[in-house]
Image (tube, rainbow, N blue to C red):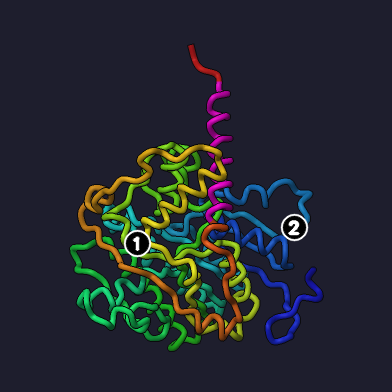
Amino acid sequence: MAASRMDLDGRPIKPITICMIGAGGFIGSHLCEKLMSETPHKVLALDVYSDKIKHLLEPDSLPWAGRIQFHRLNIKHDSRLEGLIKMADLTINLAAICTPADYNTRPLDTIYSNFIDALPVVKYCSENNKRLIHFSTCEVYGKTIQSFLPKDSPLRQDPAYYVLKEDVSPCIFGSIEKQRWSYACAKQLIERLIYAEGAENGLEFTIVRPFNWIGPRMDFIPGIDGPSEGVPRVLACFSNNLLRREPLKLVDGGQSQRTFVYIKDAIEAVLLMIENPGRANGHIFNVGNPNNEVTVRQLAEMMTKVYTKVSGESALETPTIDVSSKEFYGEGYDDSDKRIPDMTIINKQLGWNPNTSLWDLLESTLTYQHRTYAEAIKKSMAKPTSS
């Protein structure tokens, strides 16, 4: 597996050690799987929880045994962090609060998690000459220029006013009282710090801007594989409604437009960044699928059809209901109109393009979630009741 693998420039790929912060999450679990099954690299997996990578850690007879080590720690207050970064060749930081419902209800936690807590990671990488791949967000773009144009302006049809480019598009946020932008601002500021470390101190970095990565193990199903209370992101919200046979809630009519990319396609892009540092260092990459663009209402309609297929259940008579953003998210919520990534830079540098259709990624995700939900219900029913 290891000896014959080559990078994009025809050079042999040498095994490295990766310190992965947030390895137990949705993206981390899929990246760990990819690294264990297809590469010779070692992973120091850092997280508070290990449920989503438990299958990679046990038993000791697994073919990659010894190449992945789990370290249970919270980067906020653990003196082991710098030592683990020093042990690695590359650090990947996935840790974040990235749930829209938290942005305006827990703005301080959001800012601390996405900026303050990330500072030591950047500092240790820079001081110890370690390469960093930092996960940011497409939310750093904020609102499009198009959204400020008159409704009847012909410029609204010009992609230059709404397609988001890493090196050109401005970052436009709402007013300070709209605390929904606390996440995007914190993420943008840590990007600027990383970029400055690269310019002034020679930090080797890559910044990833994910555009709605979707697949098995994303977010949580409240009360099943996550807390009973809480509001996950849109696809997990809709999944939860479908599993519980509840109408899907469309915030402000579901008119916002989004693009979605399959997690396995996205992980291919990350692996290319890991193994081609000469092509990835110093770059910011959009990672998304502009071909999978829909309104949130269209997403709800498609998910209802896909779920009917994978579950065998009929759709509800009233499959969707409209709710206001204030009712759903609370005071201080605001939103971007659309997020369509420009793919020029990642295609030029890494030759990457996604290939999974929206229908196929929804079918894969909902099949997994339907099975997980059914297993959880069966397990709960099997528990003995106290008399």
Give the mark, 2 or 1, whose residue is nearer the N terminus: 2
Q: Do we see residue 153 in this rendering?
A: yes
Q: Label 2 amino acid?
A: Trp
227 up-or-down from 15: above or below: above
Q: Position of residue 386 (x, y in %)?
A: 49, 15
| Circle 2 residues within 10 Å: few <14, some 14–19, many ≥20 | some
- Residue type at the position of mark 1: Tyr
Question: Residue 263 appears in which quarter of the rendering?
Answer: bottom right
Examine the structure image and report whether residue 379 is included in the region drawn in magenta. yes
Specify start and end residues of the magenta stretch as a single range. 362-383
| In this view, 199 is above or below 69 | below
In the image shown, does 103 or 255 lie closer to the viewer? Answer: 255
* Cα separation between marks 2 and 1: 35 Å
Drawn side of residue 92 relative to residue 39, left or right:
left
The residue tagged 2 is: 64
Q: Which of 17 and 62 is in front in this view?
A: 62
Report which residue position mark 1 lands on.
112
160 relative position to 197: left or right: left
- Check the image and report above or below for 368 versus 183: above
Left or right, residue 138 beside residue 129: left
Residue 129 sits above or below residue 96 on the image? below
